[in-house]
Amino acid sequence: MSDVQPVDVERALTRIRARVHHTPVVTCAGLDALTSARLHFKCENLQKTGSFKIRGACNAVFSLDGRDAARGVAAHSSGNHAAALAQAAAWRGIRATVVVPDTASRVKRAAAERYGASIVPCGAGQTAREQALDDLVSRTGAVVVHPHDDPDVIAGQGTAVLELCEQVEGLDAVLAPVGGGGLLSGSALAARYCSGRISVIGVEPERVDDAARSVRTGVRQPPTDADSIADGLLTSLGELPFRIIRSEVEDIVTVSEDDIVRAMRLIWECTKLIVEPSSAVPLASLTSGALDLRGRAVGIVLSGGNVDLDNLPW
């Protein structure tokens, strides 16, 4: 598997710029006062398909040569990558098939189908996902676009922070949630491309802390297979993202389920933005005291807004 360089993020932005939203950056005086920091929220919850995932999917799909594209694309996903891959494939006029676990959010599965994906259900857990995807590819010959362990996907995800650095001068730190690691590793590469002085920190739920354990031990750790309200972060840390995170990310901190719910509600109430639980994980690190960035200019990636309005955590 090839490595990804900071310049690949800039190339990805050139490739996808005309197809994805240049999402706004929002500030909130109330949350600044609460955290004693200057917060800048990159609103990927307002992105096409409702999350940052369209950036990586679009970059990967439009990087394929004609022969590979004609085979169609496939992936496993709990939801947001499924919708993103379906939309990117539709833009290119090719087929997208996605393996989706039975436990996936109803809203996210419906979105993937709405964007044109063919859905193949599977059991819960990483092993079930991967086996179902292997079976699918052996039957169809589709090209796998992995949700995070793919150089083009990582470069595409990093374009959110590349834009953020263009929109906000003088950032001291960038916070991003981490599940599979595509967003965090891409964000770190983008931050280095823009400035060597920006600290990049990942945040994940305590219940699914394989990224934090991996960084601490220096060896990629297995997932806990526990559940979390932050359903978008349940996938295990990828091999390529881990290599990038080890060299480019300053730290990974964890937050409790209650911390995530409180932060999610704060974002809804204070910024009037609808975000899903995974998006609230970075802010939770500041409001819970897990991370102290007082007095610093902080970019926070609001990773997505695909939330089940009939099943809110409060």
Image (cartoon, rainbow, N blue to C red):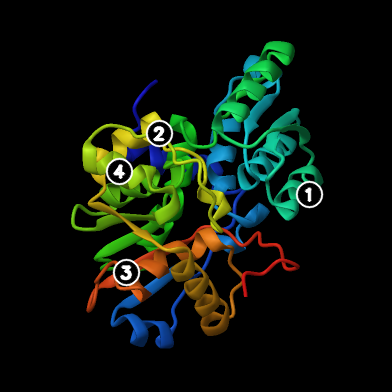
Residue 105, placed above or below residue 97:
below
Q: Quadrant of residue 22?
A: bottom right
Q: Quadrant of residue 58?
A: top right
- Is the residue under label 3 in contact with that under label 1 (CB below 8 Å)? no
- Label 3 is placed on what type of residue? Val
Residue at horizontal 62 percent and vertical 21 percent from the top: 131
Which is more foreground, mark 1 or mark 3? Answer: 1
Q: How would you rate the neighbour count of disc 3 (Cα within 10 Å): few for under 14, some for 14-19, many for 20 or more?
A: many
Q: Nearer the viewer, residue 96 or 79?
A: 79
- Is the residue under label 4 in contact with that under label 1 (CB below 8 Å)? no
Q: Which mark is residue 298?
A: 3
Identify the residue under disc 2.
Answer: 222
Q: Nearer the viewer, residue 210 or 115?
A: 210
Which is more foreground, mark 1 or mark 2? Answer: 2
- Label 1 is placed on what type of residue? Ala
Identify the residue under disc 4.
Answer: 213
**In the shown orientation, is residue 50 left or right of residue 147?**
right
- Label 4 is placed on what type of residue? Arg
- Is the residue under label 2 in contact with that under label 1 (CB below 8 Å)? no
Residue 306, placed above or below residue 108:
below
**In the shown orientation, is residue 213 left or right of residue 16?**
left
> Of marks 1 and 4, which one's residue comes earlier in the chain?
1
- In the picture, the quarter occupied by the C terminus is bottom right
Identify the residue under disc 1.
Answer: 110
Residue 265, placed above or below residue 127:
below
- Is the residue under label 3 in contact with that under label 4 (CB below 8 Å)? no
